[in-house]
Image (spheres, rainbow, N blue to C red):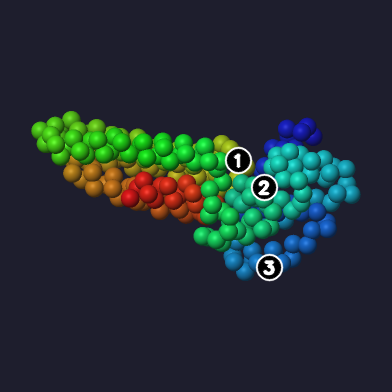
Amino acid sequence: MTDVAMKHALRREAGKAEVVVFRSGLTDTRELGDWLAATGVGHAFVDMPMGEAAERARFHALRELTGWPMLPMVFHRGEFVGGERELRARLVSGEGPQAESPWPDATQAWLRGLGYGGLIPFVAAAAALGAWPAGHGLLLPALLGYAAVILSFLGAVHWGRVLATPGRSDAVTLLAWGVTPSVLAWCALLLPQAYGLASFILLFALVLAVDHRLLGAAQGGYLALRRRLTA
C-alpha cells in the first residue's frame, strides 16, 4: 500500500465512530473506554501493535498525518484532537483548553477584524433607513440581500470541515446542514419585506444554535465571536 493510500485508509478509520482511539498493545485504555461508555459517546479502538512491520508503517503514516508523536492518538468526529487528556477536555463543554482559542494572536486579530467588519453593511443600512425613510425601497432589499449572503457564508463553514477531513463520520450531516442556511435565506427573500426581516432575525438565531451543536466546545473561540456578532 502506498503512503497516500495508507493515509486515506487511516482517515476513513478515524471517522468510523464519534470517537476513534488509535492505540498500541501497551496502551491501557480501559478507564477511557469505561468513561466513554458511561457518557454515552460512541467509540472505537484501533490497535496498532508495534511488533508488526505493517503496523509500524501505519503508525508512521498516522504520525505524519497528525503531527502527534505517540499513541494513543484520538479523533473526535473525524478530527484529530490529541491524546486522552485533550479528548476529555473537548468533550467536557466549557472546561479545559478547548475553551481557549487555538489560533495565533495574528489570526485571532484577523478573525475579529473581519468578523466585526462584516457588521458594517448591516449598521450602515439600518442607519441609512433611519435617516432616509424614503429610501426604504432601495435600502431594505440591500439589507436583506446581505443577510442572505452572510447566512450562506456561515453554512459553508461546515463544507470546509468536511473537505479538511473527508473521512469524518458526520460528513453527510455537515454537508446537508451546510446548504440549509442558503436555502432558508432564499426562501426568506421571497417573503414580503417585513416578514422577511423577521425571518432573518430568527434564522441567525437558528444557525447559531445548530452550530453550537455541530461545532461543540472545540470551537469555543469561534462560537464566542459568533455569539457577539449575532447579538
Which residue corresponds to the image point at 36% horizontal and 46% vertical from the top-left?
229
Q: Is residue 182 visible?
A: no
Q: What element carries label 3?
A: helix
Figure quadrant of residue 182: top left
Which residue corresponds to the image point at 88% horizontal and 46% vertical from the top-left?
52
Few, some or many residues within 10 Å of mark 2 (<14, 14–19, 20+): many
Q: What element carries label 2?
A: helix
Q: As shown in the figure, which amino acid type bears the numbered disc 3? A: Asp
Asked if marks 3 and 1 touch (Cβ < 8 Å), the reply is no
The reply, left or right, for residue 130 in relation to residue 30 is left
Q: Can residue 194 be seen in this view?
A: yes
Residue annotated with mark 2? 14
Q: Residue 34 carries which label?
A: 3
Instruction: Tell me how far mark 3 sits from mark 1, CA to CA.
Output: 27 Å
The reply, left or right, for residue 178 in relation to residue 20 is left
Asked if marks 2 and 3 touch (Cβ < 8 Å), the reply is no
Residue annotated with mark 1? 165
Residue 5, image x, y percentages? 73, 34
Which residue corresponds to the image point at 33% horizontal and 42% vertical from the top-left?
184
Instruction: Tell me how far mark 2 sits from mark 3, CA to CA.
Output: 20 Å
Say above or below: 211 vs 133.
Answer: below
Which residue corresponds to the image point at 69% horizontal and 42% vertical from the top-left?
66
Instruction: Tell me how far mark 1 sits from mark 2, CA to CA.
Output: 9 Å
Q: As shown in the figure, which amino acid type bears the numbered disc 1? A: Thr
Residue 179, image x, y percentages? 42, 39
Asked if marks 1 and 2 touch (Cβ < 8 Å), the reply is yes
